[in-house]
Image (tube, grey):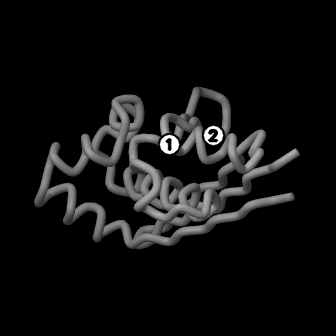
Amino acid sequence: MLLIGVDLIEIPRIARVAERWGDRFLRRVYTAQELAYSRGNAPQLAARFAAKEAVMKALGTGRRGVSWRDVEVVREPGHPPHIRLWGRARERAERLGIKSVQVSISHSREHAIAFVVGETS
């Protein structure tokens, strides 16, 4: 079975929130590795935000059942982005029998989108 999630976010919205709330927002939503990769770049932050939302939708929890930082978007040199799950997100994925989570991320000047597929056995 496949579990899917998709999310579209306005990049200027993430930029405004990051500007207004600064580290308080950034450290609540993003892991240290995500922040290091994004280096404050609004399109990168927005794409990761969309990916986190898409994962939460695929897990069927929405924002209430999983912490933002329980979903991590990892990008290693020469490889496409992938998802690491921690805490409640990982527990939920295990209960659902999800063996892997695939993600595709893209952005334009104004929008970032992420599409996620969770594969069960």
Total of numbered circles in the picture? 2
- Give residue 31's mark: none
What residue sits right under mark 1 in the picture? 88
Whether 83 is drawn above or below 107: the answer is above
Q: Are marks 2 and 1 in contact (CB under 8 Å)?
A: no
Q: Residue at x 54, y 69 (%)?
A: 7
Which callout, 2 or 1, points at the residue further toward the start of the chain? 2
Cα separation between marks 2 and 1: 18 Å
User: Label for residue 82?
Assistant: 2
Instruction: Give the quadrant of residue 4.
Output: bottom right
User: Residue 55's spot in the image, x, y percent?
Assistant: 58, 55
What residue is at 50 percent from the left and 71 percent from the top?
8
Alpha-carbon neighbours of circle 2 within 10 Å: few (<14), some, or many (≥20)?
A: some
The picture places residue 108, in percent across and down from the top left corner, at 49, 67
Left/right placement of residue 13 relative to residue 118 reads: left
- In terms of depth relative to the viewer, which is nearer, 33 or 89? 89
Q: Nearer the viewer, residue 63 or 116?
A: 63
User: Of 52 and 98, which appears nearest the observer?
Assistant: 98
**Secondary structure of residue under mark 2:** strand
The residue furthest front is 95
Q: Quadrant of the C terminus?
A: top right
